Image (cartoon, rainbow, N blue to C red):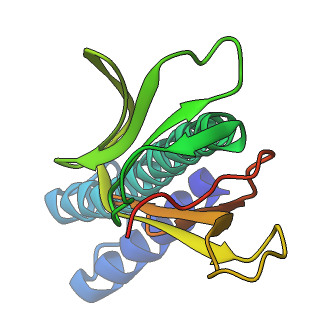
């Protein structure tokens, strides 16, 4: 189709210029015909280049978003694994960190889930392990309820909401994690 279009436009241009100049039996190309053909080929090439660039750019953006979403889902899975088996929260949780101990045999010692400098870390004394980078916001919110039905205050962790955004993706990733064990509030 592209060759047919170029040929048709070229024939139209040749006929137009020959009629305008009253050239009846001229054979070969004149300079104006050659320039018009080059200009038309240039215009078509520029549009083709733009469409190829747009397609490649769109593919790379989709790949970046897909990889970022996959990394975020892996981080949420790991955070759920860590928090699901907690037995004790050793200090008052903040919006960006919680320190805890776990009942899972593979998750021994005091551990800390924290957000610091655009990265989510899991700290296992004395090392920090980066869980996810390029995080633009992070929020960790424990919710409390009277799960053991005692007459005292509401003092057990019912669930912990975790949510974060990745930079340049614009999607909020969140999870509500319910601890398997009864975790009593030990801070004021």
The answer to whether 178 appears left or right of 136 in the picture is right
Q: Compared to 9, does 88 lie above or below?
A: above
Q: Which residue is drawn at 51% across and 50% down?
A: 65
Foreground: 96 or 148? 148
Foreground: 181 or 73? 181
Q: Compared to 18, does 128 lie above or below?
A: above
Specify the quadrant of the image occupied by residue 33.
Answer: bottom left
Residue 26 can be seen in this image: no
* Residue 169 locus on image (x, y percent): 43, 61
Residue 103 can be seen in this image: yes
* Residue 25 locus on image (x, y percent): 37, 63
Q: Residue at x 16, y 47 (%)?
A: 117
The answer to whether 144 appears left or right of 16 in the picture is right
Q: Which residue is drawn at 54% across and 58% down?
A: 7
Foreground: 70 or 61? 70
User: How many numbered discs?
Assistant: 0
Foreground: 23 or 49? 49
For the N terminus, the image quarter is bottom right
Specify the quadrant of the image occupied by residue 79.
Answer: top right
Farthest residue, direction front: 151
* Residue 26 locus on image (x, y percent): 32, 59
Q: Which residue is drawn at 61% across and 29% down?
A: 102
Farthest residue, direction bottom: 20
Q: Compared to 6, does 21 lie above or below?
A: below
For the C terminus, the image quarter is bottom left
The answer to whether 18 appears left or right of 56 in the picture is left
* Residue 56 locus on image (x, y percent): 46, 45
The answer to whether 143 appears left or right of 133 in the picture is right
């Amino acid at each position: 189709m592209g060759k047919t279009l170029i040929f048709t436009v070229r024939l139209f241009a040749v006929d137009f210029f020959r009629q305008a100049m009253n050239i009846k039996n001229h054979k070969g190309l004149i300079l104006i015909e050659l320039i018009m053909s080059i200009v038309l080929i240039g215009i078509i090439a520029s549009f083709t280049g733009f469409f190829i660039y747009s397609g490649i750019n769109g593919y790379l953006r989709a790949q970046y978003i897909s990889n970022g979403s996959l990394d975020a889902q892996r981080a949420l899975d790991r955070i759920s694994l860590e928090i699901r088996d907690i037995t004790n929260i050793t200090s008052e949780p903040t919006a960006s960190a919680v320190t805890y101990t776990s009942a899972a045999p593979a998750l021994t010692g005091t551990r800390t889930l924290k957000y610091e400098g655009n990265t989510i870390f899991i700290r296992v004394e004395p090392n920090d392990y980066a869980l996810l980078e390029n995080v633009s916001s992070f929020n960790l919110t424990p919710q409390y309820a009277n799960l053991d039905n005692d007459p005292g205050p509401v003092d057990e962790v019912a669930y912990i909401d975790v949510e974060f955004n990745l930079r340049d993706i614009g999607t909020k990733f969140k999870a509500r994690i319910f601890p398997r064990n009864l975790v009593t509030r030990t801070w004021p």
